[in-house]
Image (cartoon, rainbow, N blue to C red):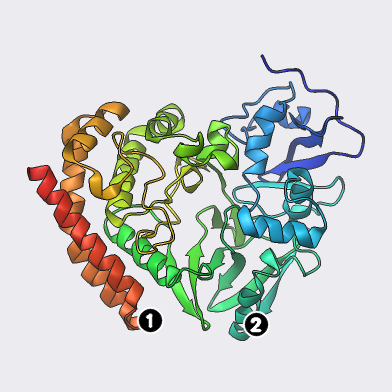
Amino acid sequence: MNAVPVAPEEGQGLEVFFEGRKAGSLSLDPSRRFVFRYDPRFLSSRDARPLSVSLPLRPEPFPDDASRPFFANLLPESGVRRAIARQLGVSDENDFALLEALGGECAGAVSLWPPGERAPEEEQGGYREVSRGEIAVLVAALPRRPLLRARAGMRLSLAGAQDKLPVLLEGGRIFVPEGGASSSHILKPAIPGLEGTVENEAFCMLLAARAGLSVPGVAVLSLPPPVLVVERYDRQRRAGRLARVHQEDFCQALGLLPSEKYESEGGPGLVRCFELIARHSSRSLLDRKALIRWVIFDALIENADGHAKNLSLLHAPEGIRLAPFYDVLCTAVYAELSRKLAMKVGGENRPDWIQKRHWERFAAEIGVKPGLVLGYCRDLARRLPGLTSAVRAELDLGLGATETIAKVSARLEKACRRMEARLEG
């Protein structure tokens, strides 16, 4: 049984805003553990919705083991987190201090502010137009100044382990948001030490779109060097304004810390992911089918990084549904990275070892007929090679042929032939 949270220390709170309204407060108790409590006025409103399926509406406070997973998953990870912490002069393990500094612009429709600092919605932040040359300088500086922490007024938190730069793109012009203003796109430079990750991800995301998977729009912006431009699916234009649409990743929804995103490290496997969709999606049948296709696609392109933080629930006006897929790329072309899938398919996590029986076992585990899964496998294995040629031609027009895309294409075509042979065997 969870202990009842102790009253938070005076002055240790952050105000939590959700869809423009104060939804509650996040505090530290005397032992410096998280305590989240919904605001009574928010709870009494007729249209109140929970921040997370793991934080249902209730007047009682949520203790650390319930509240920390949701809020900690809003923060950057790994080297990006460490670099920001150094700039702030705080420990990189201090989730609360990082949220206090970065929480103004998070994924989804949640933001965190020190008491009294959040401006009214109509007065929030602004935008500074930048040239391509200036963007190139900012992108190059990201390893030293993650999320532009060197600029006053920047309170940006984009979860994940890779450097990212949120921007507003409008009419071919580029703007940097300031003071909690929303961004419409994310710029992702190449991952240091891994050649061609921008082209790799652009190719795989475009291929996924052509194969019928729901993914955000992507493009490659040549500064140089090239950077990936990803449209934010959690931002929508409404009445001339850029509105936030709430989302939460599967770690948040399952109440797991960022360190638990991999199945091999205590995180969820595919069965728990499908159960989450079944419990909470307003269109669970469609979303379960979409997730099956993502599992197959990830196995075929050999993406070993499809973990629980790379899946999300979108809290759309019409109800909760599976969010578009993101961070899709072929990791197998990099010898430095693991070849094992983040989540096992029918008990097997080595893509080139997956047999027909593993797909059948996977189907049984998630409660669908084997014929459905095998049919999706055959469809993708047969169609992807032809789609690959079209996407390569499309990218070559803008980028020129790249060695990385050629390697990804060759591996994918081999994987498709292998799957077809095993399904017929």
Disc number placed over residue 134 in the picture, else none: 2
Rendering coords of residue 211 (x, y %): 26, 56
Rendering coords of residue 119 (x, y %): 81, 54
Residue most toward the front? 336
Q: What is the secondary structure assignment of the residue under circle 1?
A: helix
Quadrant of the image containing the N terminus = top right
In this rendering, position of residue 207 left or right of residue 71? left
Residue at 26% x, 67% y is 409
Kind of residue at disc 2? Glu
Kind of residue at disc 1? Leu
Q: Is residue 342 visible?
A: yes
Residue at 62% x, 52% y is 77
Q: Is residue 232 above or below residue 369?
A: below
**Rendered image quadrant of residue 27:** top right
In this rendering, position of residue 234 left or right of residue 349? right
Residue at 70% x, 61% y is 83
**Rendered image quadrant of residue 400:** bottom left
Q: What is the secondary structure assignment of the residue under circle 2?
A: helix
> Which class describes the residues within 10 Å of circle 2: few (<14), some (14-19), or many (20+)?
few
Q: Is residue 273 above or below residue 246?
A: above
Q: Name the residue carrying label 1.
A: 399
Disc number placed over residue 297 in the picture, else none: none
Q: CA distance from mark 2 to mark 1?
A: 21 Å
